[in-house]
Image (tube, coloured by chain):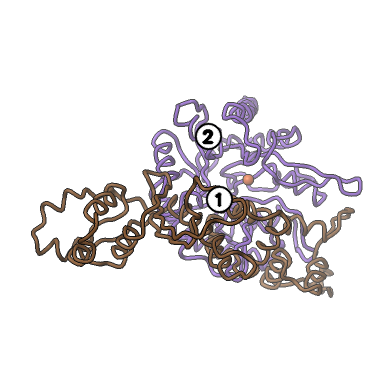
Chain colours: A brown, B purple
Amino acid sequence: MSAAPNGKPVGPTLAELQKTLSSVINGSASSRENALAESWIDLAGQTISAKDRLDVYVDAWFMRLEESLAEDFPKVRARFKSGEWEALLRDYFAQSPSQSFTLARAGDAFPAFLSEKLQVPKWLADIALFEKALYKALSARDVDVWNVAELQTFDEEKLEALSFDLQPSVTLIESKWNVFDPDVEFGSNPDLIDSFVVVYRDGFTPTSRSVAADEFEFLRQIANKATLGELAQEFQETNWLVWLSEAASEGLIHPRLK
Amino acid sequence: MRDSKQLRLFPDLGIGLGLRVPHYAAIREGRSNVHWFEALSENYMEDGGRPIHILSEIRRDKPVALHGVSLSVASVDPLNPEYLKRLKTLVERVEPALISDHCCWTGFAGENLHDLMPVPFTQEAIDHIAARILQVQEFLGRRILLENVSSYVSFKHSEMTEWEFLKELLVKADCGLLLDVNNVYVSSINHNFDPLDYVRAIPTERIGQIHLAGHSEREEGGERFLIDTHDAPVCDDVWALYEETVSLVGPVSTMVEWDADIPSYERLEEEVMKAERIRKKVAL
Ligand SMILES: [Fe+2]
């Protein structure tokens, strides 16, 4: 660091300082950048080193993100030993740095990250999707439960053309493994059984319900804006009217009224 | 002490507590004796869910201050319009008595480090931060408070002390200071300055709120090094500094932050009642 005419060292600009310190904190800094950041630190006549001072931020950065993800993905977390989990998260945050104003969104790309990891079993990414759906439901936009009895006031033409939106708290997830059943304990691997679940919010509490393949397909078509006429035709052999009224009373769907 | 006729930029709300999830029950059951609550803005900026309902319910009975951690007012990144929009929506919904964030940057190039990063005390930083505070205040239509952060590094190229920096910044940005007395103390130990020099230098009318908190301590080569952990009672030195501050500034909205190893609600109130006793003692 050279000196300005007033004797003060000429330091980095705000932009240089923030760029370099960010990379020191998130662990992406080169050794040259680490040394540069340390050279900017005023030790104030004390023994504690510049590196130890910077490490307060470095350690807090990882701890905060790790705590947040461990809380949001408890079942995924439980599958890893501490060292493996830490390595996995360092990898994840290098690839998907947190960009949200809230820590609650730091894990949004985690299920997709897991699904691309060759060393991670595919079903674990399905569990991550499920856990993400639960925390998404927690803070999704509030909506009123729609009363299915309202349908009785519609004429036939309007009924035929009616389609629905899934409520903002709802996520539909399928897996080739029985990973959604809360009662199934799996020490090593889950069983290879096609499973379907709908995650939603009951009042303010996130919850989920396992559904059969045909009901799942029904809900998926609702999400794809199928009309009531189309649904009635495609699912005529099934209990679709019961599914529809259950979905309404659980607050899963809302009619798209013009 | 501050003359009671002196211009006040911010209301004195009395003593308050940081609103945290474990306290919801005690507050909703009417077991609360504090005058106001401080809510962490980001926790209530989601699209929906339980927290904002509870905050609105609490707000019906008591004043609320909104305290943010992600404004990143010192960052060289552009201000985040989505964040500001959500903050404004929250402000309109809650009608807070005070709005604050920190004098820090929290990220760079779109990344959020989720930490309160210190700034160098330079003219460049004053100009940069002041311009952005003015922008935020214009957008929200009201004056905000900036909080001094605890820091573990300071920079060789700083051109002034932290208090000289804040003094100029507050006037230039026409904003208030949320004086965190514990942060002053923590930084004074970590950077070897006299905390009294700090509190005596701040223009009193700019101090709109006070934070108190506990910290943790470690030893480095026989010297103390403090970390702002909010996991312990307020220490005696910080109480003494608070008393000195109140005697200079007069009664200012004061609250205790306790975010880890959170004790019972009753224990927390016991802690903040010490602030009430000091406020009363100094007022005599
Ligand atoms: Fe604080």
Q: Quadrant of residue B278?
A: top right
Depth check, mark 2 against mark 1: the one in front is 2
For label 1, count other residues whose C-alpha is less than 10 Å away and answer few (under 14), some (14-19) or many (20+): many
Judge left or right: residue B53 versus residue B230. left
Quarter of the picture containing the N terminus of chain B is top right
Q: Which mark is residue B23?
A: 2
| Residue shown at the point (82%, 61%) measured from the top left | A51
The answer to which of B186 and B243 lies nearer the viewer is B186
* Residue B104 seen in this snapshot: yes
How far apart in space, not on screen, are marks 2 and 1 (Cα)? 25 Å
Q: Chain of mark 1?
A: B
Name the amino acid type tagged 2: His
What is the quadrant of residue B253 in the picture? top right
In the rendered image, residue A183, in percent from the top left (x then y), is placed at: 50, 45
Residue A98 shown left or right of residue A42 in the figure: left
Q: Quadrant of the C terminus of chain B?
A: top right
- The residue located at (41%, 53%) in the rendering is A199
The residue under label 1 is B145
The earlier-in-sequence mark between 2 and 1 is 2
Residue at image location 56% in from the left, 57% down from the top = B70
Asked if the beta carbon under badge 2 is closer than 8 A to the nearest atom of ligand 1, the reply is: no
Q: Position of residue B153 (x, y in %)?
A: 77, 57
Q: Nearer the viewer, residue B35 or A175?
A: A175
Where does ligand 1 appear, by image quarter?
top right
